[in-house]
Image (cartoon, rainbow, N blue to C red):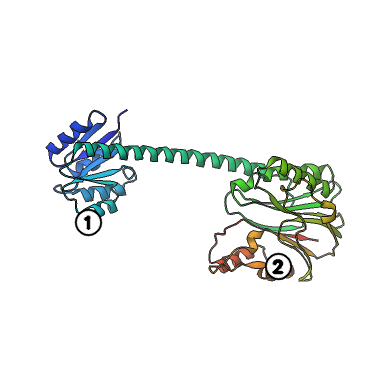
Amino acid sequence: MKPTILVVDDTPENIDVLKGALTPDYTVRPATSGAIALKIATIAPIPDLILLDVMMPGMDGYEVCRQLKENPITRPIPVIFVTARSSETDELHGLHLGAVDYIAKPFRIAVVRSRVATHLALRHATRQLAEQNRLLVEERHLIESILLKMRQTELFNPQYTRSLVSPVERTAGDLLLSVFTPDQRQLVLLGDFTGHGLPAAIGGPLVDFILHDMAQRNLPALPILQTINQQLCARLPTGIFLAAALIEIDPQRQQIQLWNAGLPSLYLLRQGAVHREIPSSLPPLGILRQLELHSASLSLEVQTGDRLYAFSDGVIEATAPDDTPFGFERLLDFLKKTSQDNCPLDQVLVQLTAFTGTDTFADDITLVEIEL
């Protein structure tokens, strides 16, 4: 089907000249006034391009262009002014209203045909890009929905935990899992994949499956962590890895064993004070196939009422307008208070919003409290 050109000019002779020049390659629809042009522009087939005279009685071309650009139906149609008014001021005014080009009268047919062909090609390319973008958005939403379904496991057990999860995008790169084994050990994993959004979320279902599957087979934490690391190395592309902490709590909740692989320090609080800081002792998972997990593990005796806190770096790296990070000190002040007063963890978002001046953060934010 030929592209459709709407030619708007109050002089029929000008319309005839343009129609004769364009008809071999295009379907030309004439309009002798601005009012008629506005009606034709909304009737199917919608014009692919409009050649618009400026100086017309009643409604001039500038007003026609303004109304075309206010209407969502006609806004995308490229408008080329064809006029004897060719001063720089006139051209700037037309371009400011949304026109894509200016052709001065008396026009040359070759120039008109060339400009029309160029802007139709640009219009076609714009439509193609818009359609490709629409398809990509649809595919992204589908993949996000699949990932969310895969991560919404009914096996998550929040017992003894309080958590805050605030993702940047619909699918988060942060991961928080909690499960009890048949012998009543609790395993809690907090992970932070590289980046955020869809690329960072792709490994989540794999880690989720491994942890729950091996926990239900009553396996210890160490081989579970080994398997997660090996599978991430084998299945994820280079550059995507997982900073993670795995905590194993014995059935009597008197002893914990944990590994910190690339996360910020974990903190064990006792009676509102920091009892133990547990820094990272391993590289993130998914980088090296062999990790010294035996020597990197930490066993701690704990008391009733102790609180263990783990968090992703999105919390401490949130920045104020002057690029000052929120940091460990401010977070620890909050954790000391919440461990005593049991205030909601989402209050940290209130503090982050006040500190950064925005409620939109650059990275996923995850914080978990484990009651011992």
The spot of residue 98 in percent (x, y) is: 30, 50
The spot of residue 187 in percent (x, y) is: 79, 51
Q: Assess disc 2: are there few (<14), some (14-19) or many (≥20) residues with their C-alpha within 10 Å of its C-alpha.
A: many
Quarter that holds the N terminus: top left
Mark 1 or mark 2: which is in front?
Answer: 1
> What residue do we see at 43% from left, 40% from top?
129
In this rendering, position of residue 310 left or right of residue 194: right
Q: Is residue 348 above or below residue 179?
A: below
The spot of residue 186 in percent (x, y) is: 81, 52
Quarter that holds the C terminus: bottom right
> What residue do we see at 65% from left, 64% from top?
316
At mark 2, the secondary structure is helix
Looking at the image, can residue 346 be seen?
A: no
Q: Considering depth in this image, is 243 or 107 the residue closer to the camera?
A: 107
Q: Is residue 21 above or below residue 349?
A: above
Q: Which mark is residue 267?
A: none
> What residue do we see at 64% from left, 44% from top?
202
In this rendering, position of residue 241 left or right of residue 213: left
- Residue receiving disc 2: 335
| Residue 121, picture quadrant | top left
What's the CA distance linking mark 1 and mark 2?
63 Å
Q: Amino acid at mark 1?
A: Thr
Q: Considering depth in this image, is 126 or 87 the residue closer to the camera?
A: 87
At mark 1, the secondary structure is helix
> What residue do we see at 27% from left, 44% from top?
79
Q: Considering depth in this image, is 160 or 319 the residue closer to the camera?
A: 319
Q: Amino acid at mark 2?
A: Leu
The spot of residue 24 in percent (x, y) is: 24, 28
- Residue receiving disc 1: 89
First of labels 1, 2 by sequence position: 1
In this rendering, position of residue 248 left or right of residue 103: right
